[in-house]
Structure formats: structure tokens, C-alpha cells
Image (tube, rainbow, N blue to C red):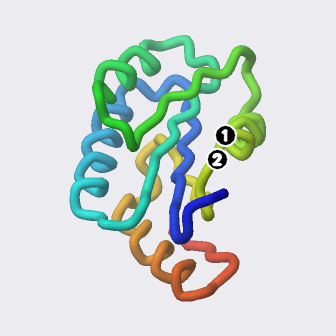
Amino acid sequence: MKNRNSFTIVIPFYNEEENLPILFEKISYFLKKNTNSVYFMLVNDCSTDNGKNIIRTLIGKEKKIKLVNLNKRSGQAGCFNTAFRLLKTDFFLRMDADLQDDVNDLEKIMKKLIDGKDFVIGLR
């Protein structure tokens, strides 16, 4: 059974090794200040750069961040499809790894979902 008011933020990535350390720092900060049941799933879409090793190293023993490596290139839709099969939380949120999405907006979105909204869309 899924946890009530729990969230997984799915971040597909492909060849984002320059952005991943910055993104990871923002994610780590977000997790430290957030009291909700929040998890991050970074889905590697067969990157040819060093992204998966960077994430593997940064994750260390962090239990709320998971790395999933796909076996074949699938694009965003394939990354999300894989994530849906692995989710164990009530809600799914998506972000881009290219730093276009602001991690700080997640709290606003999560509050709307906790308050009973079924679907929330953010605009850049």
C-alpha cells in the first residue's frame, strides 16, 4: 500500500554531467528542509557521458535519492514509464535535469496536492 502524502520526483537525464552536480546540490538542500515523505528518482536514459557515475558517487548513502539506469534509449516517455512501474508513493512529479525547473517550486506543488488537488501544472 502506498504512503499517504508521499511524493516521488522523477528526473530523466541524458548527457547532463555538467548540470547533475548542481541539480544534486539543490535536491539535497530541498530534502534537508522538507518534512514530507519525498523521494527523487533520477532516470539515466543511456547517457554516453559520465552522468551516471557522478550521480552514483553523489548519492552515497542517501536513501531518498535513487538512480535508475535504462538498458536502451527511451526518451522522456520511456523514463517516465519505467518510473511509474517503480513508484511506491502517492504522487509523481517531474523535473528536467537541465536546471530549467526550480526545485523550490516543488513545495508549492506538493501543498496543492496535499490540499486535495488531483492534478497540478506549473508554468515557467
Q: Residue at (38%, 59%) from the top-left corner?
A: 103
Q: Which type of secondary structure does the marked residue at label 2 adopt?
A: loop
Residue 37 at x, y = what percent? 42, 60
Q: Residue at (38%, 25%) from the top-left corner?
A: 55
Residue 50 at x, y = what percent? 42, 13
Distance from the alpha carbon under mark 2 to that under mark 1: 4 Å
Height in image: 70 above or below 27? above
The N terminus - image quarter: bottom right
Residue that badge 2 annotates: 87
Residue 86: which numbered mark, if any? 1
Name which residue type carries label 2: Leu
Front one among 97 and 32 = 32
- Left or right: residue 3 versus residue 31 is right
| CB within 8 Å, label 2 to label 1 | yes
Q: Residue at (59%, 56%) from the top-left corner?
A: 89
Name which residue type carries label 1: Leu
Residue at the extreme bottom of the image, as rendered: 115
